[in-house]
Image (cartoon, rainbow, N blue to C red):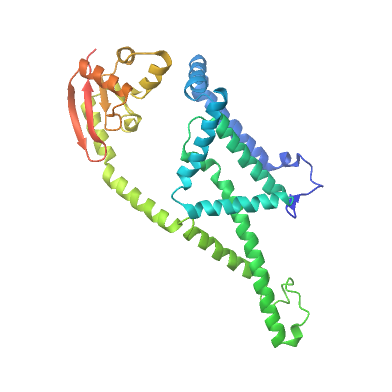
Amino acid sequence: PYRGGGRDARAPRWGFLGQREAWLFGAGLAGAAVYYLAVRVLPDPAGFATAMGYWLGVDKAPPATRGGAALVGMLGAELARYWDYFGEEPLELGLVLLGLGAGLWWAVRGSHPARLILLGLGAAFVFFVLAVSMKSKFYMLLTYPFYLLLVARLLERVAVAVGSRLAVSRLVGATRRSPRLEGSDVRAPGRSPLPVMPVTHLVLAGLVTLVALIPLRAEERAWDNYIRARRYREGQEYTALTTQLDRLAGPDARVMAPPLYWIGLRNHPYVDIFVYERLERQYGMSVAQFLDETRPDFVITDAKIATESRVEKLLYNELDARAARQFVVRHKSYGDVAVYRLDW
């Protein structure tokens, strides 16, 4: 419990552990951990340990293990991640900075919740600089709700202040018109001609609407996402494409393809073609070895992997050496989907 922005001194420090919500939260974490162990670890503990050793030790090695120069670069990359997200939305960035500034002010004045949120955001920033090598604006999803908590608290504080002032002004005007109201307390609901709470709610609703429409552009973004989703659904024709590929592959064919097509070809033994890039870096495996170990009957490539990268050139060269392209499905959304059939 919190009172006056700070924790109730009478509340036990670990009293929250006795609450039902805390137990449900713990049960959720335990259930997720059990599921992860059952699906990812227990089927092949040695393989899992090897894969994790590669991901954490090589491919996604924490910047903290690379020395000072790397940390300076990671700090710049972390700041660039924020710019990548907010660069085209200066009003949204201003709103978030306003919330952070208000949170800092409350923290200095003793607000325990504000201190807790800022401590978490600061810890997250340090963690991303020291431990996360891949920088993506999509990670903003992890911290953005906490920015909005501070913004929401600021809007609520402003609404209370404005609502109280409007109610007092209304009471003063009513007092001048009716001497019987002289001495009324605006905080007494039964005595104020315009109670504070309804006014505060109206002001808060107005502020939330204003913030949603201008800095956050909720209406514009919602409509844009609706149009994108509609066009995507109408233009992809995913089912028709994968049905055609399934027919070309034939029954029980071992398929190697980008993961995009797995849903439509899930009834086949399936190998992700992008796995080769990791195996080449981790073990120095050649394309010939990769194909000999996986032994695919049907290989699918599309425009997404038809680039000039070294690994993809190796893949195409080996496929062209083993078999000619049997078929090319031209698609407006996926480009030229090329099909190779290998004989073993």
Q: Would you identify the image quadrant in which residue 342 lies?
A: top left
How far across and how far down the image is residue 245, in percent? 24, 30
Q: Please report the residue visible at 22 percent of the width from the left and 22 percent of the height from the top.
A: 340
- Foreground residue among 29 and 273: 273
Q: Is residue 253 visible?
A: no
The residue drawn where x is 72% and y is 39% is 17
Residue 301, above or below 202: above
Q: Position of residue 145 (x, y in %)?
A: 56, 47
Nearer the observer, 208 or 313: 313
Quadrant location, the C terminus: top left
- Furthest-front residue in view? 69
Q: Is residue 283 above or below residue 18?
A: above
**Total number of numbered labels?**
0
318 lies above or below 157:
above
Report the residue at 26% width, 19% height from top.
297
Q: Is residue 264 left or right of residue 118?
A: left
Where residue 332 sits: x, y (%)?
23, 41
Q: What residue sits 25% from the left and 17% below the top? A: 318
x, y percentage for residue 107?
70, 49
* In-image side of 104 versus 65 (left or right): right
Query: Foreground residue, 62 or 168?
Result: 62
Residue 296 visible in image: yes
The answer to whether 244 is drawn above or below residue 344 in the figure is: below
Viewed as shown, does residue 87 lie left or right of 160?
A: left
The residue furthest right is 10
